Image (spheres, grey):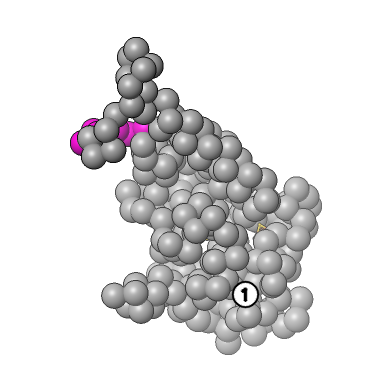
């Protein structure tokens, strides 16, 4: 099981502050050294790293806490139970969620105190993200760690926390809470969609 990383509202408002900073930066750049003349609209302005959003210009290790937290798209996929095969070490996703996962919001229902109830909940860190093979391919942390861009449905790109659900990426509507099943039957719930939802969307968008 994996950790969810923070409250969406807080993440987004912090990101808005960040983007407003970028807008101020862009406005400042419209003035020349004397402050009396603006660059022409068609002037070919060199793009710098400062023009890029943080997930394109920083490594995971370089991110602030707020930036790091906002990378979670709220899909809830990492909060699905997984089965590890003894001999091979292979890991399989199931459609059975952690008992603390809210199936509608796909957020942890007791994030601050989660370890009191789920001691094996894994906290993602800049150190362990590269080593966690089961992170879904659509996970913001995995994408950035692999040098890839975020998808259009990521709240940082769309500006809307609901797009991860609207795009059919999240666990909403297709996971069952572990409290509702006999965990001895977990193998009956093995699924592969947490690993393929991004591919399906790539195909649809192509
Ligand atoms: S306790 Fe469960 S629902 Fe909460 S973050 Fe961890 S895995 Fe997800
Ligand atoms: S899999 Fe989804 S919910 Fe889990 S950390 Fe990654 S983006 Fe967040």
Residue at the far top: name it. 34
When the figure is inspected, residue 96 is found, relative to residue 110, above or below; the finding is below
Q: Which residue is located at x 29 percent, y 29 percent?
A: 39
Question: Residue 60 is drawn in which quadrant?
Answer: top left
Residue at the far front: name it. 36
Q: Nearer the viewer, residue 64 or 50?
A: 50
On the question of residue 83 being in view, the answer is: no
SS under mark 1: loop
User: Disc 1 beta carbon < 8 A from ligand 2?
Assistant: no
Residue 47 is a magenta residue: yes
Q: Which residue in the structure is indicated by mark 1?
A: 172
Residue 51 is a magenta residue: no
Q: Nearer the viewer, residue 162 or 177?
A: 162
When the figure is inspected, residue 30 is found, relative to residue 66, above or below; the finding is above
Q: Which residue is located at x 59 percent, y 60 percent?
A: 161
The reply, left or right, for residue 104 in relation to residue 193 is: right
Q: Position of residue 7 (x, y in %)?
A: 68, 51
Task: Please identify the quadrant where the C terminus is shown.
Answer: bottom left
Q: Nearer the viewer, residue 132 or 126?
A: 126
Q: Position of residue 96 (x, y in %)?
A: 63, 76
The reply, left or right, for residue 189 in relation to residue 27 is: right
What is the magenta range? 44-50
Q: Which residue is located at x 60 percent, y 81 percent?
A: 174
When the figure is inspected, residue 129 is found, relative to residue 96, above or below; the finding is above
Q: Position of residue 204 (x, y in %)?
A: 35, 79
The reply, left or right, for residue 147 in relation to residue 83 is: left
Q: Which residue is located at x 40 percent, y 70 percent?
A: 198
């Amino acid at each position: 099981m994996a950790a969810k990383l923070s409250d969406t509202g807080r993440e987004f408002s912090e990101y808005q502050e960040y983007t407003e900073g970028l807008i101020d930066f862009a406005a400042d750049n419209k003035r020349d050294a004397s402050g009396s003349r603006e660059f022409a609209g068609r002037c070919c302005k060199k793009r710098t790293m400062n023009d890029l959003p943080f997930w394109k210009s920083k490594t995971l290790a370089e991110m602030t806490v707020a930036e790091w937290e906002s990378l979670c798209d709220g899909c809830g996929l990492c909060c699905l139970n997984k089965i590890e095969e003894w001999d091979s070490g292979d890991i399989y996703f199931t459609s059975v969620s952690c008992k603390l996962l809210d199936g509608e919001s796909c957020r942890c229902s007791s994030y601050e105190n989660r370890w009191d109830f789920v001691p094996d909940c894994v906290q993602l860190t800049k150190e362990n993200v590269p080593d966690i093979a089961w992170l879904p391919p659509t996970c913001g942390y995995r994408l950035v760690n692999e040098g890839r861009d975020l998808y259009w449905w990521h709240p940082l790109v769309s500006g809307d926390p609901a797009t991860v659900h609207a795009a059919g990426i999240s666990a909403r509507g297709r996971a069952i809470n572990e409290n509702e099943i006999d965990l001895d039957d977990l193998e009956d719930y093995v699924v592969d969609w947490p690993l393929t939802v991004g591919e399906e969307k790539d195909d649809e968008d192509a």
